[in-house]
Amino acid sequence: MIRSRIGQFAALWFVTLASALMAASPNFVIINIDDLGYADIEPFGSKINRTPHLSRMANEGRRLTSFYAAPVCSPSRSSLMTGCYPKRALPIPHVLFPGYATGLSPNEITIAEVLKSKGYATGMVGKWHLGDQLEFLPTRQGFDSYFGLPYSNDMGPAADGVKSSLGEPLRKDKGKGQPPLPWLRGEKVERRVLADDQQTLVSRYTAEAVKFINAHQKEPFFLYFAHSAVHWPIYPGKAFAGRSKHGYYSDWVEEVDWSVGQVLNTLRDLKLDKNTLVIFTSDNGGTKRGVNLPLRGYKASIWEGGIRVCTIAWWPGKIPAGTSTDAITGMFDMLPTFAHLADAKLPDHKLDGVNIWPQLVGAPDAAPPHDVFYYYRGFNLKAVRQHNWKLHLKNNQLYDLDADIGEKNNLAAQHPDVVKQLLAVAEQADDDLGRTGLGPGVRPLGKVDNAHPIIDHDGTVAPEFR
């Protein structure tokens, strides 16, 4: 009897301890916007768009003002998923297109797989864009569930409304040869996406995100919420179209803000806000439809406006409210940071990101997380940054980003010693990723045989996606 009671007590103690440890595991949410400009939201200086939920998020959290993505979307998303420079994990010259035989290798260890190893529920909602063949989908890369578009919302035939924005006539000169755009649930096609569906992208995604949080509120979870907004074509929802007085693009930015509010309010209502780290960011700099000021340049460039993105970290009670950091951080830091907080093992291959938790909490003794940052555009190294100095390699243009964030004043003639130092830094890339071509540190791209579109040009859904 005594042994039985001791055994029962031990079992109860173990269950209680396990429950306590499980409750202590933080939740993670990444909200990734597509093509959002650096100053498209009020916390980063917007005077046009009304973004009260993001303003509150910044007032309760920390702005990351030197957070780097990549010039375009597929590379940026690979960096977020793998903790690496895009060239290391997804060596492609530009972005992935429908029906490509290549994608993020299944041998890569994603942030979802790292957290899944610690018992996390993992879900993704929205734009994937790391390969649309079955072997490359989110459900094969560590996510328990997926709902969204496998690539950009403009990648389809013009007749389906994906080559023209809301209210515009259908374009007949674009999209020839591209298959229809599929909405996937898990690994199955839910429907072919048409113009009316595009107008529901934000609201449907938001409903799916909220549903995931509610379903997994009793266990640790990771939600990757990747909006298709505000990528062209521009399709704000019916409740937002025309509301901003500044055009459909601003309407869509404001709808995204509403979506962020829905996610944060759900966390508050469920009493999960004190145990959830939320990161809001963009996959690259904004286009000319948006505002990147005071940065120079736009999406697809390696000017700061093409690669530095507006980012907010939020965790009430843990991250200091109403603060900011100008430390060099980026997409590749998310995996090691989340792994640290979840007490998860890092992949055993090389990572480029580091744990930036000291920067997120504003630790006074925190060392700079990155001494050097490499600006890659596809296979080519275009610029390097060390501390405040940035050197564009093509013409050896040198800028002091602390004093000149807009890259207006070329100081190469005044600081030849700094130019020489940064050229030496660039040369070091030859031993790893390479300045051009594929260096020894680049890992293999995922490839499949007999690649084909998810939905064929005649509307037929491939058998494995039915």
Image: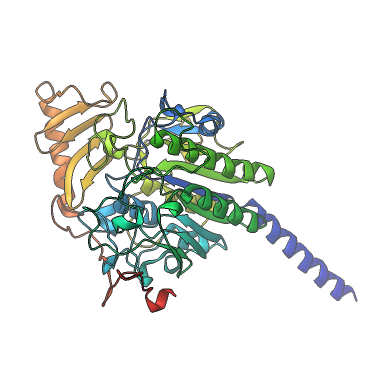
Q: Position of residue 103 (x, y in %)?
A: 30, 64
Q: Is residue 367 visible?
A: no
Total labels drawn: 0
Vertical placement of residue 208 versus 466, above or below: above
Instruction: Write down the quadrant of residue 11 in the picture.
Output: bottom right
182 vs 1, nearest the viewer: 182
Among all residues in the image, which is located at the extreme front? 169
Residue depicted at x 26% and y 25%: 406
- Splitting the image into 4 quarters, where does residue 397 fall? top left
- Give the x, y percent position of residue 236: 45, 42
Of 334 and 261, the residue lying toward us: 261
Residue at (47%, 30%) from the top-left corner?
364
Please report the residue visible at 12 percent of the width from the left and 26 percent of the height from the top. Answer: 412
Relative to residue 417, is residue 209 depicted above or below?
below
The quadrant of the image that shows the N terminus is: bottom right
**Residue 194 locus on image (x, y percent):** 40, 57
Residue 291 in view = yes
The quadrant holding residue 372 is: top left
